[in-house]
Image (cartoon, coloured by chain):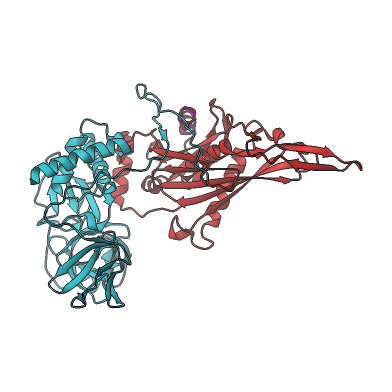
Chain colours: A cyan, B red
Amino acid sequence: MAGGSRTWMGLAAPPALKMAAITMRLPVPRKLVGPSASRGGEKHLVAPGDTITTDTGYMRGHGTYVEDEKLIASVAGAVERVNKLVCVRALKTRYNGEVGDIVVGRITEVQQKRWKVETNSRLDSVLLLSSMNLPGGELRRRSAEDELAMRDYLQEGDLISAEVQSVFSDGAVSLHTRSLKYGKLGQGVLVQVSPSLVKRQKTHFHDLPCGASVILGNNGFIWIYPTPEQKDEEAGGFTHNLEPVPLSDREVISRLRNCIVALATQKLMLFDTSILYCYEASLPHQIKDILKPEVMEEIVLETRQRLLDLEG
Amino acid sequence: MASVVLSEAEKLYIVHGVQEDLRVDGRGCEDYRCAEVETDVVSNTSGSARVKLGHTDILVGVKAEMGTPKLEKPDEGYLEFFVDCSANATPEFEGRGGEELGTEIANTLYRVFSSESSVDLKSLCINPREHCWVIYVDVLLLECGGNLFDAISIAVKAALFNTRIPKVHILEDEEGSKEIELSDDPYDCIRLNVDDVPCIVTLSKIGYRHVVDATLQEEACSLASLLISVTSKGALTSMKKMGKGSLDPESIFEMMETGQRVGKSLH
């Protein structure tokens, strides 16, 4: 009933002096940057309850159910058809593990021979002690002392990068850090986005030319960190550089973090090229301005334009 | 408060960033996040406001009802605060979990508004010793994204600004008993003067410096924080320290001054 009498409160303090800059604004309906021109096939989007087809010759896959001889969607997403199998892939969902995915996770529990890792999925993932790299990269049978020293390697709250080894029948994911590029993560910033926004690519570890590195976890956890100088770390990620990160690197990391948040808010796919273009588009603005709605729209619009030019 | 678990390296990164005046999202130590304020959102209240500060979402509803004045202040109305931490905010608030935090916030609000000059309570009086307006302020926490107190105080101020209290006429009967008549016209109402209502500024101590408007991650790194309520003219009305850490007395003065500057621009 009430149309909402909007009042204007407060003004932004002039940023000339070193005063606090506070902006209050009225909520405006956020405009999503318009849908890009369809490239190739049109996506068939459905909402829960929409009929997909009335043809009974199809097998039903995930996200569908049959009622009255009609195939109806149970989640909101895009319809995928493989020969006779019809399934609906949800747009916003928890992470579903697939073998070979790279994930970034946070340790929640230390149990007898394994760690429980939170990866934004329905169940906590599992990292077995036998799947973990020992410092120095040695290969030996894990003994009882290793079990007692588990907490020295990884504690609750630590972040790790790992690869999915297998998926249990209930959907829980088993991880391994058997390569030297995985392991505990050091100083940096974590950004959480929806898992469906991370594009599947050959490699998820990127060293961006602007001066920082980024790990795009398939589960939606994105880790931004300063590029380490020496690339050959035999420790496998256990010894960490705890020195303060220089200010120039910090600015790059903060800018990247804001760009990724902007792209995620506007529902753009995240991969190294899109992040790089967004970073370049945001250079004329101040870092903290990127999160303002108008600036965000402008930057994402420019990024989308460049990506379309790249494709076509 | 709801908190996130962070690794040691992440905390170190945040602390070093604060020392150099560059926080994780690019703000300086004295910058607020972008805030959205909307009033008159709930239609069956006397006044309401909704504030979104980053991920923090607060809804405040104000209802004015008739009641009897308190014995020690017979010619003034009074305000009652109630804070509800909804389970939507974090799973910790499920059931009785949010009550402790809710009572803490309500007590803080009582202290902030206890000063004589913040709200003109005499204007809320209808009949001395018999009738007065009681303003019930209900705060609902929809989402907890760090810096609850600042957002709540902004929302309360906006809601009080939006409150409309109907005008009251007192009729004398023949036997001497008084009858109260509320005017039916929705536009015939009095508004509260909120010029002197203070706003809370939370300063969290991280490392050797303090930051304004901490996010959840920054709150996890800070050991102690100071809440001060500042009016638009820069006067302090109340102060409260929270957290397990200790604050150096000199740093308290520094933080107070910062809070005053920030508080003035917040209004």
Q: Is residue B230 above or below residue A230?
A: above
Image spot of residue A125 (x, y percent): 27, 67
Q: Is residue A63 above or below residue B104?
A: below
Which residue sits at x=21%, y=50%? A240
Image spot of residue B49 (x, y percent): 52, 42
Which residue sits at x=11%, y=52%? A233
Image spot of residue A239 (x, y percent): 19, 53
Q: Is residue A228 among what the camera can see? A: no
Where residue A245 sits, quadrant-wise, is: top left
Q: Does the magenta-highlighted stretch encompass residue A132? A: no
List the single residue furthest toward the top: A16
Q: Is residue A149 among what the camera can see? A: yes
Image spot of residue A55 (x, y percent): 21, 74
Q: Does the magenta-highlighted stretch encompass residue B261? A: yes
Magenta region's main secondary structure?
A: helix
Report the side of A59 relative to B154 (left or right): left
List the single residue furthest toward the front: A54
The count of marks equals: 0
Report the side of B156 relative to A286 (left or right): right
> Magenta stretch?
B252-264
Where residue B54 sits, quadrant-wise, is: top left
